[in-house]
Image (cartoon, grey):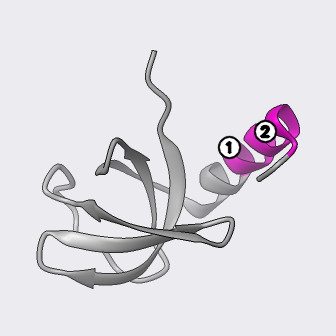
Amino acid sequence: MCLGIPMRVVDVFGEEAVLEQGGMRIRARTDLIEDPISVGDYLLVHAGFAIQKVDEREALETLAMLGEMLGTL
């Protein structure tokens, strides 16, 4: 089973983006996303790759559910 985490884009450069969630920042490859990526977008991230763009409402709902389950997000 794989788990993708929604993260907010804080910077984009080439085929990579800096993403943030819960005070943690990571760099992820964006090659798999066909649509343009902008600061403020939410991306579903797994194993260092952004695999899907998600709308803000869906991202925040998912993060809230994960937070309830884990008690940390």
Q: Residue lying farthest top?
A: 1
- Tell me the number on the disc at residue 65: 2
CA–CA distance in space, label 2 to label 1? 5 Å
Residue displayed at 79% across by 48% down: 64
Residue 56 rendering spot, x and y as whole percentages: 60, 62
The residue that mark 1 highlights is: 62
Residue displayed at 74% across by 39% down: 66
Residue 31 rendering spot, x and y as whole percentages: 13, 56
Residue 34 shown left or right of residue 59 in the figure: left
- The reply to whether the magenta stretch includes residue 5 is no
Q: Who is closer to the viewer here, 48 or 4?
A: 48
* Range of residues picked out in magenta: 61-71
Question: Residue 69's image quarter?
Answer: top right
Q: Who is closer to the viewer here, 60 or 4?
A: 4
Residue 32 rendering spot, x and y as whole percentages: 17, 49
Question: Residue 60's image quarter?
Answer: bottom right
- Tell me the number on the disc at residue 46: none
In the image, residue 36 above or below residue 53: below
Q: Amino acid at mark 1?
A: Thr
Q: Amino acid at mark 2?
A: Met
How many residues crowd mark 1 within 10 Å: few (<14), some (14–19), many (20+)? some
SS for tag 1?
Answer: helix
Cβ–Cβ below 8 Å for labels 2 and 1? Answer: yes
Residue displayed at 44% across by 70% down: 19
SS for tag 2?
Answer: helix
Residue 27 shown left or right of residue 36 in the figure: right
The dominant secondary structure in magenta is: helix
